[in-house]
Image: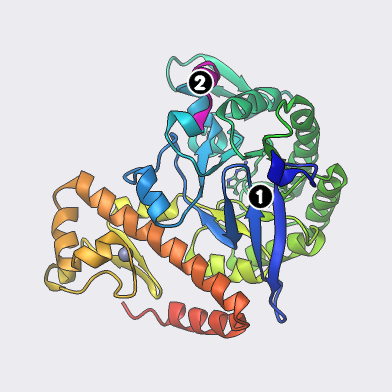
Amino acid sequence: MSQFESTEYPLKFEIIKKCSVSKARCSQLTLPHATLQTPQFMPVGTQGALKGVLPHQIKDLKCNLILGNTYHLGHRPGPELLTLAGGLHKYMNWDGNLLTDSGGFQMVSLLKLAKVTEDGVEFESPHDKSTMLLTPEKSMEIQNAIGADIMMQLDDVVCTTLEDTARMEEAMYRSIRWLDRCIAAHKRKSEQNLFPIVQGGLDARLRTISANELIKRNTSGYAIGGLSGGEAKEDFWKAVSLSTDILPDNKPRYLMGVGFAIDLVVCSALGCDLFDCVFPTRTARFGCALVDNGQLQLKRKNFAIDERPIDDECYCYTCQTYSRAYLHMVLNGDEVTACQLMSLHNVAYQMRLMQRIRDAIKNDTFPDFVRNFVRNYYSSGK
Ligand code: PRF
Ligand code: ZN
């Protein structure tokens, strides 16, 4: 891969501009399938597609990095069929970049039945009730077959608001042992990047140990995990800031599972580069349209006579074509069309927000942008 000749990994990360007041930076990230600028939000396509949005529509929104899930794709189509199809990019006709999560987090959050042992994450198959075991080696096998541009290590994820420090510590050290097993099992090092995940809950000591251990492995980027599980905003932001203080400046930092507009703005200021969350597409299906000062619940009666678009500054097809009144009607009737129109807007909203963040960093107006955004967000003029 010629564009990566000078680097050890199939990834290039160049900082274009740093904010002089915060830790925010705007960078250019080159991956095997495309180049993009960060900070960037990655929409989630659980089964190898975004619910209600076609690959060409995602491209039209200038998005060239989306997420897939090992947990779902490992079941169906499974690694053999994926290898046969030449990987997920070809299979789903997506020529942009793909990032896959390792599967453990989805199992623990979706299936309350999952059990973690030193071997891996044990769970009941959703299909035939047999017991299955996702090990670091199995996760790498599936992710190598998928062919994602960025793969995630299998980690032991615990909920910060439910578990005690002893369990946090065990999970943090186990995640490091699993990282070493992932590195050993990764078979396509010149084609796919493997990101490790900082764990340690809200505990500064544990997070510091975790981040320093990951740095020793010298991977091409880092993820910050174990957060965004319902902890207080202040605790969450502190844990993020502590992590970005330790992680090296010259590599991308991916904050996992974060997608609320306010968190994207604040965590960009704290030096995070990549984000993902199912929230924008999931909430769209329930009739919620994202706008700067919060969210519009378009199923509510007052929207039946509102002839304005969701957002008159949004360039998406939905806003260019339809009124809130029309969307209100469709949302209360035709689920499939409503899902498409709403998801398209919410993904476009996230993309435009990230573009505004990048522009502000590049134009030296980021501190003002943050101040105005936060003031407007909490003014809640629905
Ligand atoms: N680990 C993995 N995936 C994740 C997370 C994590 O910690 C989060 C944050 N809670 C979202 N997705 N593997
Ligand atoms: Zn729109």
Give the SS element for disc 2: loop
- Image coords of residue 161 (percent x, y): 61, 53
Q: Is residue 147 above or below residue 237?
A: above
- Image coords of residue 89 (percent x, y): 50, 34
Decide which of tag 2 and tag 1 comes sooner along the chain: 2
Q: Which residues are magenta?
A: 78-88
Is residue 85 found inside the magenta-colored segment of the image?
yes
382 or 251: nearer the eye?
251
Circle 1 crowding by C-alpha within 10 Å: few under 14, some 14–19, many from 20 = many
What is the total number of numbered labels drawn onto the structure image? 2
19 or 258: nearer the eye?
19
Q: Residue at x 44, y 41 (%)?
A: 45
Residue 91 in view (yes/no): yes
- The residue to which callout 2 is attached is 78
Q: Quadrant of the C terminus?
A: bottom left
Q: Is residue 292 above or below residue 168?
A: below
Q: Is mark 2 within 8 Å of ligand 1?
A: no
74 or 286: nearer the eye?
74
Q: Amino acid at mark 2?
A: Gly
